Image: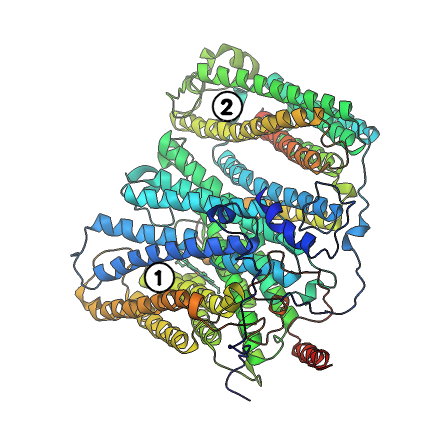
Amino acid sequence: MSATIVSLPDQSTARIPKVNYLTKENGILSWLLTGDHKRIAILYLISLSFFFFIGGALAGLIRLELLTPQTDLMATDTYNKVFTMHGVIMIFFFLVPSVPATLGNFLIPLMIGAKDLALPKINLLSWYLYIAGGILAIYTMAAGGVDTGWTFTTPLSTHYVNTNVLTTGLAVFIAGFSSIFTGLNFIVTIHKMRCPGMTWFRLPLFVWAHYAASILMVLATPVVAIAIVLVALERTIGIGVFDPAKGGDPILFQHLFWFYSHPAVYIMILPGMGVISETISTFSRKRVFGYTAVAFSSVAIAVFGFFVWAHHMFIMGISNYAVLVFSLLTMLVAVPSAIKIFNWTFTLYKGSITFETPMLYTFGFMGLFTIGGLTGVFLGTSGTDIHLTETYFIVAHFHFVMVGGMLMAFLAGIHFWWPKMTGRMYPEKISQLAAVVTFIGFNFTFFPQFILGTLGMPRRYASYPPEFQVLNVFSTAGATILGVGYLLPVLYLTWSLKYGAIAGNNPWQATGLEWQVQSPPLTENFTRTPIMDHEAYDYEWLERQKEKEVTTSAG
Amino acid sequence: MPDSTAIAHGAHETGSNTHDEHPPYLRHHFESTEQQADAAGFAMWLFLLTEVMFFGGLFTAYLIYRNWYYPAFVSGSHQLNVVWGTLNTLVLIISSFTMAMGVWCAETGRRRGLVLSLSLTLILGLGFLGIKSIEYAEKIEKHHVPGFHYSLQSFLDPQSDRAVFSEYHDKPLMLDMARHTEVYFSLYFLMTGMHALHMIIGIGILGFMIFRARAGAYTSGHVTFVENFGLYWHFVDIIWIYLFALLYLISRH
Amino acid sequence: MSEQIELGEHQHHDEQDEDAHHIVGPGVYVIILIALLVGTALTVWASFIDLGPWNPVIALAIATTKATLVVLFFMHVKYSTKLTKLTVGAGIFTFLTLVSLTLADYISRAWGSW
Ligand code: HEM
Ligand SMILES: [Cu+2]
């Protein structure tokens, strides 16, 4: 077995197809008014990256402040604003739309054999809403920021702070509708636009994962929208719904907020899990082990995700009985996540594994997500949570799942489908280096935070007792490495747009429908409606297909 | 029409399966008009799901506080006028009926019937809002609008509020409980206000549809828009059916 | 460049065929209208009688009946595909999850600690 599965066309003769979705029309307007899901995906990719680096810069400031125990870099209230804006931007403007709006948008129609998403105009509208929300968020920062934490905790957000809660709330509200429309579009598309022969159990697991995440987007997001409306009204006219002085209950806000935000963590991870299913299969040349189990576990995660939200509220004054029940239910939701991890591991077993960049990120995902998920179980256990909540343990937990999990998956996916999106390969060696640097940097940054948390260092403070400094220095040093790890892809991916090797249709020898068409694809994706006659991940089918090609071209 | 231009090319240029009988409203990424109508209808239903959850947050809040502050909610609801509420319910139910008739007219190609049904629906919708604003005006007069010089008088001293007192003979509430009537009215205004906002949007779209229907749109096969708007209008009706029960009826004793 | 892989020669079977777009006529609508008007009268009448804890139950039962009629007939769900029915079900289910689990917390707060 060779050490790589990459097979590129002869570079001396290969050309990028002249007609493709990128060259079809020119001019900025052809992009801003496009209905093509692939172009909208690119628009998202560019704007998301922009927000990612803003959020990242804020993270850098946080880590710099925490290098020393004293508050020396910025005032404490500035620090509060910095971590709040970091959270708001990273969650609502990067992670929630990250994989779905870019890769999901680009790939779902290709994977199911459709010409586009069912509602192209709504798709474009989603992007505009996202941009409008994003501009408001940036405006908020310029206007002095907001310091409630990304959770808008009442009564802090309604009564005590004097910062831009309203504009931030509006920004999140608008971005929420962008997310709703994306999810709605995906569900309709997956139900109604599959090509002949594309039965539910022939769908790539990427599509299943997006289907599950879309259900969460459609059903959970409106609840946070109304919660934000209530906060805004409480702040402006004092309706009393969250005001204890008038008989309101601030904890009601927590219920409404976490009814969305727990499912939202699955909105953030499920699409990433979809990416992992694809890469793991491709780079071990095997059908995903337990396809049906993986498919249904996505849906199970989505459904169970609605029953556990109060595990974010164990110490907030909900009833003891609610703590008990929600703690038990939380254990339930860990099961389908574990099913996925086990099935991916079995997929690797006896596979012909190769270690191209997407696979490196995939391995990173599997290790880090497992740690993140397991620590989630500690936190779901009310007894341990009471000790760990509001410490750096929480920060470590969710960065392991969100950065170690989702961001790794996002990068795995971007590298994996880069040749499809642009027609060119990224440079392999340096990108492998970037993957390794990211992994090392990540662990340096966030593993010490688990220890800090168990030692009792609280989150969301600009200063800390001197005995915590060593671990914090580790963390800040790690963040620097991590920063390099994220900058590298931007540089070499941009470079590859012009100088990357021509990828050809199917550089990975992958089985998905998207790999059977030209790279970059035509605007209408397929010249003729495809007909699906085999399971997903059928590598034998691919072999036969290649033989057919050889015989026809020889004959 | 950005997407149709972007998508149009392939299907035509490759000329693989372009049938000329395709009606003009078939967008090019769909295989057939049925698929297109199906997708649009399904999308509408999903949108209504988000609406359900949006109102769901308000319903949850209402149920919780009613459970906590029962006496305040009883006194609060006594301030609502059941006659106006009932009248509005009837108006809205009839408008749902005229809307349903509109859908039928569109489906069976009756242009004048469609215009008439939609116009009646619009008038009834306006009627609903008219009655609602009479009710709102009453609340404003009595200072029952939370956040704007909210007055507790009707609850601390019910006899001062003659009209309501003669009907219900409410006992005075303790100051603490009386103050919680503000939560009741917050929810009352939030829920009915959000509902009214949906009505206003609906009426706007109705106006647009009447304008187009007169020119013969919707009655030549492409009825999806009317059908989907119908779904929306009925959904708004359903919300009201529950608001009427929860706000006006269940706390009368 | 536009290569076309033959993915097999499966029969193109339309999944959408099952539902031959049922048109509901005025007869049904009139009946439902009358039922809704009667329901409204009934629920208002019931609200004038003191039935203690049964007042809210009856009012909500009638409201739910009315809503069901609207959904089934005005919104054509009775004649729609399984998918539409499932969608409606999913909405009701999630809504009830939100209400019931939240209320469960509030109600059980009164039980104190163990
Ligand atoms: C595998 C199952 C998981 C379990 C059992 C779990 C459990 C928990 C629990 C109990 C908390 C609350 C801790 C506290 O505030 O005291 C928590 C916090 C959090 N989790 Fe998870 N989690 C899981 C997976 C995930 C995933 C996949 C993500 C995101 C992709 C995620 C993101 C978060 C975030 C952002 C917070 C902190 C929210 C905040 O207070 O700012 N979790 N998790
Ligand atoms: Cu959670």
x and y percent of residue A448 in the render?
Answer: 30, 70
- Residue situated in front as seen by the camera: C13 or B81: C13
- In the depicted view, which residue is nearer to us: A422 or C58? A422
Q: Is residue B191 above or below residue A262?
A: above
**Residue at x 33%, y 42% (from the top left corner):** A139
* Residue plotted at (43% across, 16% down): B157
Residue A537 image offset from top left, x and y in percent = 64, 73
Please tell me whether mark 1 sits on a helix, a strand or a loop. Answer: helix
Residue found at the far bottom of this picture: A1
Residue closest to the eye, A487 or B145: A487
Q: What percent of the width, then of the height, locates residue B116?
A: 73, 21
| Secondary element at tag 2 | helix
Which of labels 2 and 1 is toward the front? 1
To which residue does mark 2 refer?
B75
Does the closest atom of ligand 1 sit within 8 Å of the Cβ of label 1?
yes
Residue that protrudes farthest toward the front in the picture:
A13
Q: Is residue B84 left or right of residue C35?
A: left
| Labelled disc at residue A395 | 1
